[in-house]
């Protein structure tokens, strides 16, 4: 997903094209997909990039990086005319996804640039048809909370803005990275509704819908605390700098 306008970045540059160590965030994500595709058990069939009004700028930045040449033929750009939420972004991909029956759809964000190919692989090899990345945060402010049932299994995700006071105390959070079976994803995308405080279509809702309708267990890949940098998103220039500093500290 790369359609966000990134207004909080206070910049004329599309959010996903802001750089970490001189490399646009979305290019970092794509470079990890190249590494993932070299794994013997993974076949990279198609890359759908959801874009808004900055499609041309994003396309140019991707094509300019020679290291991404091997996957350019696999990329399709999907236009999201209105920013109506993450669920709507994936709804825009439905016609394309119908061509890939019974495949794993790995859903990534162009502004979450530090996810490694190893973590992507660890998520994809889980057995369930619906898989998500989670972790525990001492300060979970801003993240969707993972609600667990009495069997210690995934129940649902509640976005921060929609949490009750009790749910705000939950420290297990949604990492925002998903793998969903393509047939199930296409079947239930039309079920998404925008009856929430933000009037947006949340992709997180489809996890609960599929779990309920298909009676399946949702697998959770729990990231260790030292790897939390992998799911850190960027919404402001300050967060961009903090992430770059963390990366450089890790390299050192």
Image (cartoon, grey):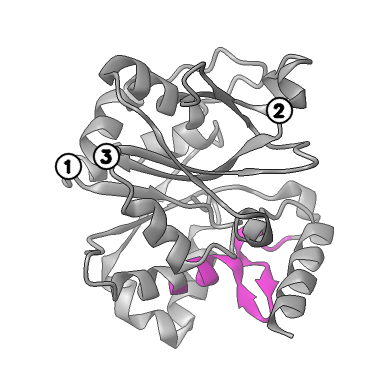
Name the front one of labels 2 and 1.
Answer: 2
Residue furthest out toward the right: 238
Q: Position of residue 204 (x, y in %)?
A: 50, 30
Q: Is residue 32 positioned above or below 45 on the image?
A: below
Q: Earlier in the sequence, mark 2 or mark 1?
A: 1
Q: Which mark is residue 170?
A: 2
Tell me where the magenta segment starts and ends, as one range: 12-31
Residue at image location 43% in from the left, 77% down from the top = 63
Report, in whole angstroms, how far the alpha carbon at label 1 lies from the one at label 3: 6 Å
Q: Are marks 1 and 3 in contact (CB under 8 Å)?
A: yes
Q: Secondary structure at mark 2?
A: loop
Q: Is residue 76 left or right of residue 244?
A: left
Q: Earlier in the sequence, mark 1 or mark 3?
A: 1
Q: Is residue 195 left or right of residue 5?
A: left
Q: Mark 2, residues whose alpha carbon is within 10 Å: few (<14), some, or many (≥20)? A: many
Q: Position of residue 123 (x, y in %)?
A: 40, 52
Q: Nearer the viewer, residue 51 or 208?
A: 208
Q: Which mark is residue 196?
A: none
Name the front one of labels 2 and 3.
Answer: 2
Q: Is residue 239 left or right of residue 157?
A: right
Q: Is residue 14 visible?
A: no
Q: Position of residue 138 (x, y in %)?
A: 78, 42
The residue that label 3 is drawn on is 181
The residue that label 1 is drawn on is 102
């Amino acid at each position: 997903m790369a359609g966000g306008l990134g207004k909080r970045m206070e910049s004329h540059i599309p959010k996903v094209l802001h750089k970490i160590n001189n490399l646009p965030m979305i290019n970092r994500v794509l470079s990890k997909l190249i590494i993932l595709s070299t794994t013997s058990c993974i076949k990279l069939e198609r890359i759908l990039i959801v874009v808004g009004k900055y499609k041309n700028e994003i396309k140019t930045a991707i094509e300019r990086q020679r290291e991404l040449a091997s996957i350019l033929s696999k990329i399709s750009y999907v236009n999201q005319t209105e920013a109506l939420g993450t669920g709507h972004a994936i709804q825009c991909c439905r016609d394309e996804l119908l061509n890939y029956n019974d495949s794993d759809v790995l859903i990534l964000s162009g502004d979450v640039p530090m996810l490694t190919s190893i973590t992507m692989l660890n998520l994809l090899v889980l057995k369930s048809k619906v898989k998500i990345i989670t972790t525990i945060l001492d300060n979970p402010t801003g993240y969707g909370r993972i609600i667990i049932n009495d069997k210690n299994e995934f129940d649902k995700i509640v976005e921060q803005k929609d949490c009750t006071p009790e749910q705000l105390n939950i420290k297990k959070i949604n990492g925002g990275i998903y793998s969903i079976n393509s047939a199930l994803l296409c079947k239930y995308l039309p079920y998404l509704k925008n009856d929430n405080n933000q009037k947006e279509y949340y992709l997180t809702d489809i996890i609960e819908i599929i779990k309920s309708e298909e009676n399946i267990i949702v697998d959770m890949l729990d990231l260790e605390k030292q790897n939390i940098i992998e799911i850190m998103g960027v919404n402001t220039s300050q967060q961009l700098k903090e992430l770059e500093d963390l990366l450089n500290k890790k390299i050192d």
